[in-house]
Image: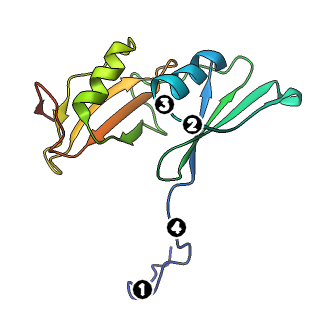
Amino acid sequence: MNAVADSSPHPLQISGLHHVAIIASDYARSRHFYTQVLGLPVVHEMYRAERQSHKLDLQLPDGTQLELFSFPSPPPRPSYPEACGLRHLALRVADMGASVAWLAAQGVAVEPVRTDPVTGDLFTFFADPDGLPIELVAPSGSAAPGVSAG
């Protein structure tokens, strides 16, 4: 593989993340979770009869999208033990304490909030309805009771 000189721009010129696609085992349950519990607005929704598949485009505030799909009988995702591939989805929040309180009020089990020893940011994990790990990350000044070192 040939290295590109540091002084010239990389040929790909990646400018950001466009979307992340997630396959749900129960479309209605996951749709509710991502739109009502996480509060992501719907950009577009359709049912593709030829594939027996729903597709839901959700918008994050920075313009990145989450695509939620359903397919007949998808195999379960191996999360534990961790497997190769996508490890988790990390979402940035402004207030860790308020975010954790909201999720708990919705019946979502959230791990204890910890502090990243490198960045000082607060972080915690929870799972979507299919067990996909989701991380919340907040600036170190964000309110979070009982924070431990990461």
- In the rendered image, residue 119, in percent from the top left (x then y), is placed at 18, 51
- Name the image quarter holding the C terminus: top left
- In the rendered image, residue 70, in percent from the top left (x then y), is placed at 69, 25
Mark 3 or mark 4, whichever is nearer to me: 3
Label 4, on which residue?
14
- Residue pushed farthest right? 50
Mark 1 or mark 3, whichever is nearer to me: 3
Q: Measure how far apart labels 3 and 2 are at the Cα level.
A: 6 Å
Callout 3 amino acid: Gly
Label 2, on which residue?
41
Circles 2 and 1, Cβ within 8 Å, touching? The answer is: no
Label 3, on which residue?
39
Dot 2, how many residues are within 10 Å of its Cα: few (below 14), some (14-19), or many (20+)? some
Circles 3 and 4, Cβ within 8 Å, touching? The answer is: no
Dot 4, how many residues are within 10 Å of its Cα: few (below 14), some (14-19), or many (20+)? few
- In the rendered image, residue 76, in percent from the top left (x then y), is placed at 57, 19
Mark 1 or mark 4, whichever is nearer to me: 4
Mark 4 or mark 2, whichever is nearer to me: 2
Callout 2 amino acid: Pro
Label 1, on which residue?
5
Of residue 6 and residue 39, the one placed in the foreground of this image is 39
Mark 2 or 1 closer to N-term? Answer: 1
Q: Callout 2: helix, strand or loop?
A: loop
Q: Measure how far apart labels 2 and 1 are at the Cα level.
A: 42 Å
Q: Measure how far apart labels 1 and 3 are at the Cα level.
A: 43 Å
Q: Callout 1: helix, strand or loop?
A: loop
